């Protein structure tokens, strides 16, 4: 803060990025019971991984690179912590976001059950971290250790992976069988009704043995 700000009595404000897991009401099929958002009391570490799958064979000069490299789902590993100690509501204007953020006795058990349910029911959620936000995420794995120091706390390692959602459509080909190189094998089967064989008149008899 500058000296000018101090002179007029301004106080520094610490702006922290919003972090949380918000299950999606639109990305999941209808009928899913969508749990409330989840906010960690402490975020210890966030590991972000983005990867391209790239071809290993040689490419022709000038080839379209998007045909030979594609993006893999993004992955995030979170180290999160809760305790049974109460915490203030993060935002008074959005009390629902604090519904399961750390304000109830023995809350670590309910939060752990929440995370297990998120994994077992395969609910898609939006993930907000300190660096970026993600849509259509699934909780892939969940780990925690309880010892004499963490009996009344919950320290979890949550591995989240992105689900890349696409839309497909059916296209009917109308090309003639004569225009196809292998039309006999690639052209769709066409129903011509009942077909019967008739005696032929132009043929070459097989030679006698």
Image (spheres, rainbow, N blue to C red):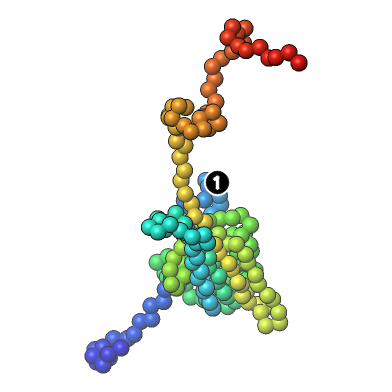
In this orientation, does residue 128 appear? yes
Depth order, front residue of 70/112? 70
Q: Position of residue 190 (x, y in %)?
A: 53, 22
Q: Position of residue 128 (x, y in %)?
A: 46, 67
As displayed, is residue 56 above or below residue 131?
Answer: above
Residue at the extreme right: 209
Name the residue at 40% across, 66% down. Answer: 93
Label 1 packing within 10 angstroms: few (<14), some (14-19), many (20+)? few
Q: Quadrant of the N terminus?
A: bottom left
As displayed, is residue 204 above or below residue 154?
Answer: above
Name the residue at 47% across, 27% down. Answer: 177
What residue sits right under mark 1 in the picture? 31
Number of marks in picture: 1
Q: Secondary structure at mark 1?
A: loop
Image-based side of 35 in relation to 61, left or right = right
Image-based side of 143 in relation to 160, left or right = right
Q: Position of residue 68 (x, y in %)?
A: 47, 57
Depth order, front residue of 88/145? 145
In this orientation, does residue 105 appear? no
Q: Quadrant of the C terminus?
A: top right
Residue 121, by quadrant, is: bottom right
Name the residue at 52% across, 59% down. Answer: 57
Q: Position of residue 175 (x, y in %)?
A: 43, 30
Depth order, front residue of 189/208? 208
């Amino acid at each position: 803060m500058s000296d000018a700000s101090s002179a007029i009595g301004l106080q520094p404000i610490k702006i922290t990025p919003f972090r949380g897991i918000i299950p999606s009401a639109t990305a999941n099929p209808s009928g899913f019971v969508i749990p409330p958002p989840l906010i960690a009391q402490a975020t210890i570490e966030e590991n972000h991984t983005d990867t391209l799958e790239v071809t290993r064979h040689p490419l022709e000069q000038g080839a379209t690179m998007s045909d030979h490299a594609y993006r893999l789902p993004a992955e995030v590993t979170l180290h999160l912590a809760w305790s049974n100690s109460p915490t203030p509501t993060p935002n008074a204007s959005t009390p629902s976001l604090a519904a399961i953020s750390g304000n109830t006795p023995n809350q670590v058990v309910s939060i752990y059950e929440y995370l297990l349910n998120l994994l077992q029911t395969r609910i898609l959620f939006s993930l907000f971290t300190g660096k970026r936000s993600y849509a259509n995420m699934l909780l892939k794995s969940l780990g925690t250790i309880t010892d004499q120091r963490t009996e009344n706390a919950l320290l979890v390692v949550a591995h989240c992976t992105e689900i890349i959602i696409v839309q497909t459509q059916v296209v009917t080909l109308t090309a003639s069988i004569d225009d196809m190189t292998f039309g006999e094998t690639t052209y769709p089967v066409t129903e011509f009704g009942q077909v019967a064989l008739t005696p032929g008149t132009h043929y070459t008899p097989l030679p006698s043995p």
